Image: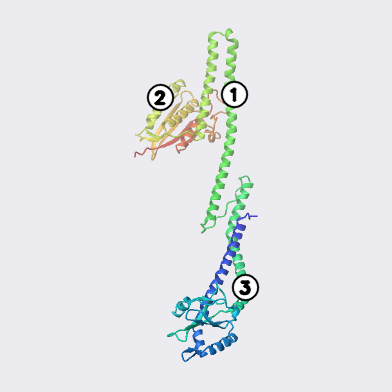
């Protein structure tokens, strides 16, 4: 079963890694020890064969003394059983030896390694072991009777059968246990240190995981920030910083969703009210006209039709404003920015409302005391903002009142201000003038206004990266102010 936690996986990986390293270390150590042992042994006994010839006086009158050779064989078998001595002819054939006859399996020895030895090549040099058909061993060799007139070679195997048995016994007992203990102690110490380091490294991840679990269990409402440490910029600290940012973003989005849900509920309630009233009135007038059309005179029928048509227009206007506000809230409206003269746009909008102002006996005029530069904005949407402001001001301005649209430059922007001397807005209502279906100065719904104009104006100005300021004094009027950026050519 695979471990689940990161620490357990790291611990298992470290254990397997150390076991592999320990095994590789043991194999390499054994191989290198064997190699250097051969080099050391061959260098130490480089002149052994030559010394045997001189010490035992095997050469007499320039000829090999066979009797002295046999005595030397017997002597060294007793004194140093780890070596084996062989007398070879000039072709490498084995003429005599110190080993037991039944254990010698080769009839001759390859002369290649012997010539390499005599020429002084680098050790270790491995020659044929007469006791085996496939084994090679380090050796010492000397020509007999002399190097100037060699008739054969005294060939000394430095690691004979007795040496091999002793070495196997030693390695299989003490050396093996010593190596095993050393490797195990090294592995345990390395594993303990590695696990401690891994624990220190994963401690911060464990803490971060705990914070994220708590955040999830709280349904993403309670966020305990990950404590960032100064001076640390590793991946874990970056992950903790990203978690803090993500958690705050999620909480903000949840808060927005909650607020939007509340707005949606309020919107549904308000829309239901605003749609129900004109629909009921429209239906009532049409049904009455249908049932009593024959009993009504022409003037009464025309009056009923005019009222029904007015309610139908109110419904159309309400639905259009709802769709427009929904598009603005969903960011589906894309700005078509272009340079234009703000004074000309304001003058055109004022012209549209001159007839409505005249019907209410209100004065409508523009103030612009200096030449203004072009501004950069969506001219169609800004026109809609001005229309909503003027329409709102006309509704709340008494006959004989005045509405002024003032323009002035405030680098790097142009300020547009719509001011009236109407009823004004009470202080407690001022923060809510841009809410959907709000109607300033009265809690009652008017029969021809849905209360969406200012909300639409605010969304449009926000899309341009600007804000609307509003100030009002009850009985003295209201002022709406916004700015547009000056167009920079090129």
Residues tagged 2 and 1 counted as in contact (Cβ below 8 A): no
Residues tagged 2 and 3 counted as in contact (Cβ below 8 A): no
Residue bearing mark 2: 351
Q: CA distance from mark 3 to mark 1?
A: 97 Å
Viewer-nearest residue: 271 or 197: 197
Work out whether mark 2 precedes mark 1 in sequence or the reverse, and give the earlier one. Answer: 1
Report the mark closest to the observer, 2 or 1: 1
Report the mark closest to the observer, 3 or 1: 3
Q: Say few, some or many: other residues with alpha carbon within 10 Å of mark 2 (under 14 / 14 to 19 / 20 or more).
A: few
Q: Could you tell whether 170 is left or right of 372 in the image?
A: right
Residue bearing mark 1: 276
Report the mark closest to the observer, 2 or 3: 3
Work out whether mark 3 precedes mark 1 in sequence or the reverse, and give the earlier one. Answer: 3
- Where is residue 103? Give x, y as percent: 60, 78
Residue bearing mark 3: 176
- Where is residue 423? Give x, y as percent: 51, 28
For label 3, the SS is helix
- Where is residue 425? Give x, y as percent: 52, 31
């Amino acid at each position: 079963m695979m471990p689940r936690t990161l620490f357990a996986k790291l611990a298992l990986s470290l254990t397997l890694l150390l076991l592999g390293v320990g095994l590789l270390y043991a194999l390499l150590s054994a191989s290198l020890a064997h190699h250097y042992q051969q080099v050391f042994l061959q260098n130490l006994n480089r002149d052994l064969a030559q010394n045997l010839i001189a010490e035992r006086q095997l050469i007499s009158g320039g000829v090999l003394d066979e009797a002295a050779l046999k005595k030397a064989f017997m002597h060294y078998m007793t004194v140093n059983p780890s070596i084996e001595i062989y007398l070879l002819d000039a072709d490498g054939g084995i003429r005599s030896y110190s080993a037991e006859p039944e254990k010698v399996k080769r009839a001759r020895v390859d002369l290649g390694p012997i010539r390499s030895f005599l020429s002084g090549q680098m050790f270790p040099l491995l020659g044929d072991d007469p006791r085996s058909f496939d084994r090679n061993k380090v050796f010492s060799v000397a020509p007999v009777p002399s190097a100037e007139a060699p008739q054969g070679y005294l060939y000394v195997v430095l690691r004979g059968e007795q040496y091999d048995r002793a070495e196997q016994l030693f390695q299989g007992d003490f050396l093996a246990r010593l190596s095993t203990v050393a490797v195990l102690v090294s592995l345990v110490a390395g594993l303990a240190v590695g696990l401690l380091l891994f624990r220190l490294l994963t401690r911060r991840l464990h803490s971060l995981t705990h914070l994220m679990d708590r955040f999830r269990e709280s349904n993403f409402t309670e966020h305990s920030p990950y404590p960032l440490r100064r001076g640390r910029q590793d991946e874990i600290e970056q992950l903790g910083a990203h978690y803090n940012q993500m958690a705050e973003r999620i909480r903000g989005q949840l808060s927005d969703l909650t607020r939007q849900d509340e707005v949606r509920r309020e919107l549904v309630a308000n829309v239901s009210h605003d749609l129900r009233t004109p629909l009921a009135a429209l239906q009532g007038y049409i049904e009455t006209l249908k049932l009593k059309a024959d009993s009504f005179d022409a003037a009464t029928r025309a009056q009923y039709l005019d009222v029904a048509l007015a309610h139908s227009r109110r419904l159309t206007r309400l639905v259009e404003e709802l769709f427009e506000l929904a598009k603005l809230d969903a960011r589906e409206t894309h700005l078509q920015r272009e340079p234009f003269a703000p004074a000309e746009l304001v003058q055109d909008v004022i012209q549209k409302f001159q007839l409505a102002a005249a019907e209410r006996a209100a004065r409508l005029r523009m103030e612009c005391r200096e030449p203004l530069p072009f501004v950069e904005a969506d001219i169609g949407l800004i026109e809609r903002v001005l229309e909503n402001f003027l329409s709102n001001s006309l509704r709340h301005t008494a006959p004989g009142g005045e509405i002024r649209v003032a323009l002035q430059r405030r680098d790097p922007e142009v300020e547009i201000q719509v001011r009236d001397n109407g009823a004004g807005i009470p202080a407690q209502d001022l923060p809510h003038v841009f809410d959907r279906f709000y109607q300033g100065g009265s809690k009652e719904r008017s029969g021809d206004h849905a209360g969406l104009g200012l909300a639409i104006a605010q969304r449009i100005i926000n899309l341009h990266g600007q804000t609307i300021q509003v100030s009002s004094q009850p009985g003295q009027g209201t002022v709406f102010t916004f700015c547009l950026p000056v167009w920079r050519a090129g």
